[in-house]
Amino acid sequence: MNKILKAEAKWIQGTKVESETRGFKLTIDKPLEENGTNLGPKPAELSLQALGGCILFAYLYAAEKLRVEIEDLKVDVEGEVVPGGWTDEQNIERTGFKQVKFAVQVKTKHSEETIKKVHQLAKKVSPMFDNFSHAVKLEGTFSIH
């Protein structure tokens, strides 16, 4: 049975947006240099945080599954954006990330070969890695109130 995850974003004022999911609220905003009020991360930054958190959870899952002890774990994520957009290899104008990179730092007593297996399994089971790696069907509607 499919599971539906939901979130709501509501404009508060200026560039401030309040987003909520499962009762958890967060403020989304733009930085001062983008004419925002810097009250929270912008959507692109949140997507990078989501990717990093998901990869971290996937690493913990994979390590447990493969019986690998991890002492410490950190995921750094960076996304390259081009102000004003860019054109991809198919000559399509794009406004999203041009490239996203992540680096996992693992503290463990296990070998590089063992951690490579954890890394591969983590990428395989991470939903956000999948979302960033493959196109997702996206639909949108609107209504006037």
Image: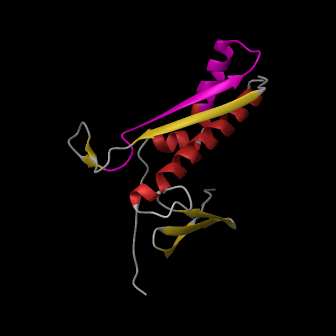
* Residue drawn where x is 32% and y is 44% of the image: 82
Give percent across and percent down for residue 84. Answer: 28, 51
- For the residue pair 48 and 92, the one nearer the viewer reads as 48
- Kindly give the residue lying farthest to the left in the view shown: 91
Tell me which corner region of the image, top left, top right, bottom left or bottom right, holds residue 138. Answer: bottom left
Q: Quadrant of the N terminus?
A: bottom right
* Residue drawn where x is 62% and y is 19% of the image: 116
Asked whether, in this view, residue 134 is left or right of residue 8, the answer is left
Q: Is residue 58 above or below residue 116?
A: below
Give percent across and percent down for residue 86. Answer: 27, 44
- Kindly give the residue lying farthest to the front in the view shown: 32
Is 81 included in the stretch rendered in magenta?
no
Q: Quadrant of the C terminus?
A: bottom left
Is 97 included in the stretch rendered in magenta?
yes
Image: magenta residue range: 95-122
* Residue drawn where x is 46% and y is 68% of the image: 15
Q: Is residue 69 above or below residue 76?
A: above
Q: Is residue 78 above or below residue 141?
A: above
